[in-house]
Image (spheres, rainbow, N blue to C red):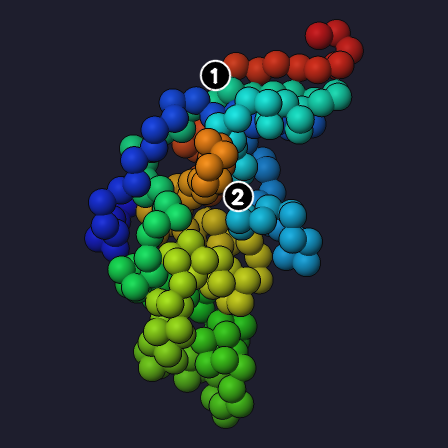
């Protein structure tokens, strides 16, 4: 993985995380990371596999007939984004993320980076000028918000966005709820999750 884009990696303090689920699983690699952007509460901080530091919160997703998983994250395999990361310090990464969107669908990416301008030749999206324009705009946001803006505007599939994030060296993002003492770890790379324990609720035979 290439870490040249980043400042010092965010330090993850929690050893264990929790995930409540209605599905029994041996890993998380079959989970669809797509999200409904029209529903505010649905994956509010973007696509990914949602973990929490609060076991009671995870249990609410497991009840009444699901499973509560205790997991550990291998943070040595990539970068973790924090709420404090700034877009202005990560322009090269954002540029690379938009370029990946181009490779997937050049026309969709073109209309995004050119702010839906009417230009005669869609291939003009390859001109660095357009990406620099959007990068200057994104630099006013936090890093995670800029990444999510790119996901919403330039990617047609959230699964492709999470895959691109991983390819650029990011395994996930930690969102801290200030004053609540709770964090969410939103994972983009399913391979970094190791299940340590499973608890079932109301399942026949358990």
Which residue is disc 1 drawn over? 196
Figure check: 111 above or below 66: below
Rounded to the nearest angstrom, the CA distance separating label 2 from label 1 is 20 Å
**The N terminus, quarter of image:** top left
Residue drawn at x 45%, y 58% as measured from the top left: 145
Disc 1 packing (10 Å; few <14; some 14–19; many ≥20): few
Residue drawn at x 37%, y 67% as measured from the top left: 140
Which residue is disc 2 drawn over? 48
Image-quadrant location for residue 87: bottom left
Q: Position of residue 11 (x, y in %)?
A: 29, 35
**The C terminus, quarter of image:** top right
Residue drawn at x 41%, y 32% as measured from the top left: 192
Figure check: 119 above or below 3: below
Query: Disc 2 or 1, which lies upstream in sequence?
Result: 2
Q: Position of residue 5 (x, y in %)?
A: 25, 55
Front position in the image: 166 or 82: 82
């Amino acid at each position: 993985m290439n870490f040249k884009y980043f400042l010092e990696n965010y330090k993850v303090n929690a050893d264990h995380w929790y995930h409540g689920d209605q599905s029994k699983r041996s890993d998380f690699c079959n989970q669809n990371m797509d999200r409904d952007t029209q529903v505010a509460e649905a994956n509010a901080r973007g696509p990914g596999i949602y973990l929490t530091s609060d076991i009671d919160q995870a249990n609410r997703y497991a009840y009444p007939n699901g499973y509560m998983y205790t997991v550990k994250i291998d943070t040595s395999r990539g970068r973790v984004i924090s709420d404090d990361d700034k877009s202005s310090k990560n322009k090269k990464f954002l540029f690379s993320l938009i370029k990946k969107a181009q490779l997937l669908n050049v026309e969709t990416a073109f209309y995004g980076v050119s702010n839906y301008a009417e230009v005669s030749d869609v291939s003009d999206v390859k001109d660095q000028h357009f990406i620099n324009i959007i990068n200057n705009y994104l630099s006013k946001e936090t890093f995670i918000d800029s990444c999510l803006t790119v996901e919403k505007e330039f990617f047609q599939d959230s699964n492709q966005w999470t895959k691109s994030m991983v390819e650029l060296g990011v395994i996930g993002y930690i969102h801290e709820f200030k004053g609540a003492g709770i964090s969410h770890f939103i994972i983009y790379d399913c391979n970094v999750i190791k299940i340590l324990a499973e608890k079932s609720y109301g399942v026949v035979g358990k």
